[in-house]
Image: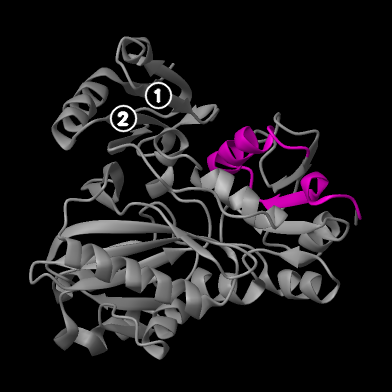
Amino acid sequence: MSNSSPLSKKIGILGGGQLGRMFIENALRYDVEIHILDPSANAPCAHLTKHFVQGDFRDYQTVIDFAKNLDVLTIEIEHVNTEALYKLEEDGVQVIPNAKAIETIKDKGLQKQFYQDYEIRSSLFRLVNSQKDLAQHTSFLPFFQKARKDGYDGKGVLAMNSTSDFEHGFDVPSVLEKSVDIEKEISVIVAKDQLGNLALYPIVELVFDPVYNLVDYLIAPAEITEQQAKKAKDLAQRVCQGLNSPGLFAVEMFLSKEGEILVNETAPRAHNSGHHTIEASISSQFDQHLRILLGLPLGSTNSYPCAAMVNIVGSEGHTGKALYLGIEKLSELKNVYVHLYGKEITKPGRKMGHVSVLGNNREEVIAKIEQVKSAVQVIAE
């Protein structure tokens, strides 16, 4: 490992997708050496660093070999080999977030138990080991079955509204999460540096695509009361303090019809609900992440009066080499910024990019969201 200044560290990232790509875009402004491990030779990060390694971040030895000579190791996806992370920590490699925090979050069962242990308000839950166990929880209906591991971008989640849904359930260890009558979903991005200092971004309001169960678009700041905002920020800080690790965390929450705020899930990394910060905030979530890894002071989270992010996803019925339609129309719009992720293949619901929108007020931003959504489509050639 290098003994040079903090600004010339060797940084490793497990995962080479769009989050790593946006991290590198920001990191290129600094004198850092970025190493990427990803199973795909065509990962979005593959051509952005000369230190790209094709390999499985779920494999113990692959992770050890990749990271053993690095100064600091981080993630852009939580489904990694945590046994290797513990070993690397023992051997002196700094892992951010630490192995314990990642281990807790990547298993949705452990994550729910963490909320319970720290008295952090979350929806009621039960744990099951297989599909046949669902029949023992008919009195708990309606609920969502969430696979404890490997869920991502709406995958690994099923709505269970009646016993007839059980036949389609996952036959894997799962969390059964009691359905909540939701008014809206919100998210708080929190940066926690190596000294324990926290920086919170304005709360984001999330609107989900009902077909793909992923974020369609977001607006910041969320349209909630001052009291609700304070409660949400307090909960987010309690989550980060309980995890006891530096890092960047996205704490997703439900605002119920009764006005109650419940923590839904936490991501220990940069998150879709923070992409707008690239243009909207003085220091983006990716800049904060880098500052945390380098041991630098946190940046300012002061942000534009109103901002939005619209996900660009693959169109239904199209699988193959991606073709982007309508992108040129967005260049005519003021304060609209396109980010494409460099993914060669599109498929229905796959995140292919996003568009950030800035405005002086919510009405202006919503009007631009509609323009973006009507202009852009991703199809297969």
Task: Give the number of marks.
Answer: 2
Instruction: Write the residue at 17% across / 51% down.
Output: 223
Res 252 seen here: yes
Question: Which span of residues is magenta-colored?
Answer: 3-31
Q: Position of residue 199 (x, y in %)?
A: 47, 59
Q: At 33% from the left edge and 82% from the top edge, which residue is drawn?
A: 132
Q: Residue at x 59, y 51 (%)?
A: 289
**What is the three-letter code of the residue carrying label 1?**
Tyr
Q: Secondary structure at mark 2?
A: strand
Q: Secondary structure at mark 1?
A: strand
The residue beneath circle 2 is 358
First in sequence: mark 1 or mark 2?
1
Q: In the figure, residue 371 lies in which quadrant?
A: top left
Q: Is residue 167 visible?
A: no
Q: Which mark is residue 37?
A: none
**What number is the disc on residue 337?**
1
Q: Quadrant of the N terminus?
A: bottom right
Q: Position of residue 368 (x, y in %)?
A: 22, 25
Q: Amino acid at mark 2?
A: Leu
Disc 1 residue crowd, few under 14, some 14–19, many 20+, Cα 10 Å = some
